[in-house]
Every structure is written in structure tokens, then in C-alpha cells.
Amino acid sequence: MERVNQTSSVSEFILLGLSSRPGDQKPLFILFLTMYLVTITGNLLIILAIHSDPQLQTPMYFFLSFLSFTDICFTTTIVPRMLVSFLSEKTISYAGCLTQMYFIYALGNTDSCLLAVMALDRYVAICDPFHYVTTMNHHRCVLLVAFSCSLPHLHSLLHTLLLNRLTFCDNNVIHHFLCDLSPLMKLSCSSTFLNEIVIMSECPVVLVTPFVCITFSYIRILITVLKIPSAAGKRKAFSTCGSHLTVVTLFYGSIFYVYLQPLSTYTARDHIATLVYTVLTSMLNPFIYSLRNKDLKQGLRKLMGRRKSQAAPS
């Protein structure tokens, strides 16, 4: 990824971004800078609250802390480059473009796998509570996180290497705000047949498998919860899943809309859906998980209380 494709005459690409109108650039810069700062601050607070509160040292919050860390990295791969393009440089080097695409796919699919792992955690907690501690022990949690982080990198590497073998001629204008697979393949002046075959066969497996795991987990959870006699017990069980379901709906709804369609149908209208799973979901995650979770809200209050006491003059 550090070299220019030797069979290509293109050494850089032009990212058109969200708007080409000069008057839109500064408002968009302010909007996305604000969203980026909120994303970083919110997810950092989640990580700090979890790791500083002994009551939050459970598998569910262990996975959530890694999801927050991944969201920070995911957003940092995309938004700083957008901010630069709003005010000055809209070009990105060939190597830089492929590098960005690699990390977008690696971190995006890590998010997907972590959401599946979190659904599995809720399934065990609700459907098999007596074996929860032994089933979701620390060693197994670490293995699940390691798998969730490593497999997506292999997936991303495959598509990056396949893209690197393509030839790019005179057209180097990407009608997008990031280096994504479909817009880049449209620019190629060589055959993309192999790339499209891999996308249509391998990508649905990588995308759909975690979603199937989540769906299976929640079907079993629903069956178990419906058997609980008391309404209070049902509400308590569902309350532990509400935040996760909201994030899953936002993330997978937008990502399926973008990627489970033929290459020829990919248009600028998909930019909004791409923004949802790359930027908006990462920003909203801390709010979704903290506003609907009493333990996490208490952990955040403790964290802020400690920060205030440390800042107060003695």
C-alpha cells in the first residue's frame, strides 16, 4: 500500500466530498468537527467510567469498552480527512486512499463482530443465567474480542490487495467523501470481475453472519422473556437489551443499504447511509448506552465526581 500501482497512471485521487459548493464547506467543517469531538469525548468517558468502576467489571461492559475504542479509531480514520477536504486539500494519495479503505473495512467489521459478541453475552445472561459466570469467563471474553478484531483485518486485507491489482487511468475523481470499494472500482479501466465475484460471495458472509448471530440470540431471548410470569421481570430483561438493539438497528440498517446492492446501482444517495454507520452511530453510541443504563450512568457520575474533587483546591 506504500507504492503507487505500477500499471496505473493515477498517483492520487480527488475526493469530491459531501458538497462542491464553496459556501457549504465552512458549515460542514464546523458540523463534522463538533460531531468528531463529541464522538471522541463520549466514547472516552465510557471507557474511563468502565475501567474505573469495580461494579462495571462485567463481560457486557468489557465488550462495550472495546466497542467504544473501536468507534474512536473508526471515526478517526474518516473525519479528520473530511475536515481537511472541507477547507483545503481534496486530493488523497493512491497509498493514502487504499490505507484509509483498509482501516474503514477492518474497523467497521470489528464493530459488527463486537455487536454480535454483545448479543451473545445478553443471550447467555438471560437464557442461561446460572452458568453465565463460567460461560462468559474472562479468558473466553478476551478470545472473543481477539477474534472480533483479527478476522475483519483479514477480510479488509483481501479486498485491499484485490483493489491494488486494478488499473486506474485518467479518471481519478471519487464521488464520495471517503475511499470506499464501490466508487474506486467504478474508476478502474481494467476488469473488476474478480473483485465483484469476491464482493458478492465473501462480503455477504462477513456482513450477514454476525447479523444472523444477533438475530438468533434475540429470538432465543424473546422466547425466554415471554416465559417470565411477572411484567416487572419482563421489563427488566428487555431493558438490558434495548440499547444494544437500537445500535444494531442503526448500524446494520445503513450498512446493508449500502453494501447489499449491485455495484452498478451505487449512487451519491448512499452517502447519507454511509454517514450513519461511519460517523453518526459512533457518535450516538455513548448516549444510547448511557441514557438507558442506570449502572453506566452511575459510573459516569462517579467518574465526573472524582474529576471534580481532584480539580478542587485543597
Image (tube, rainbow, N blue to C red):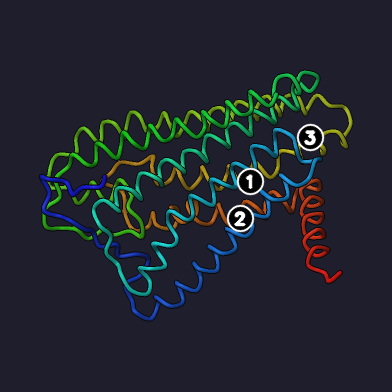
| 202 lies left or right of 210 | left
- Spatial CA distance of label 1 from label 2 is 10 Å
Q: Which dot marks residue 284? A: 2
* Amino acid marked by disc 1: Thr
Quick check: 273 above or below 244? below
- Spatial CA distance of label 1 from label 3 is 15 Å
Quick check: 193 above or below 228? below
For the C terminus, the image quarter is bottom right
Between 117 and 182, the one lying in front of the other is 117
How many marks the image carries: the answer is 3
* Amino acid marked by disc 2: Leu
Q: Which residue is mark 1?
A: 246
| 66 lies left or right of 258 | right
Q: Secondary structure at mark 3?
A: helix
Q: Which dot marks residue 237? A: 3
For the N terminus, the image quarter is top left
Between 250 and 111, the one lying in front of the other is 111
Q: Secondary structure at mark 2?
A: helix
Where in the figure is residue 176, as x and y percent of width and height?
33, 58
Where in the figure is residue 141, as x and y percent of width and height?
64, 28
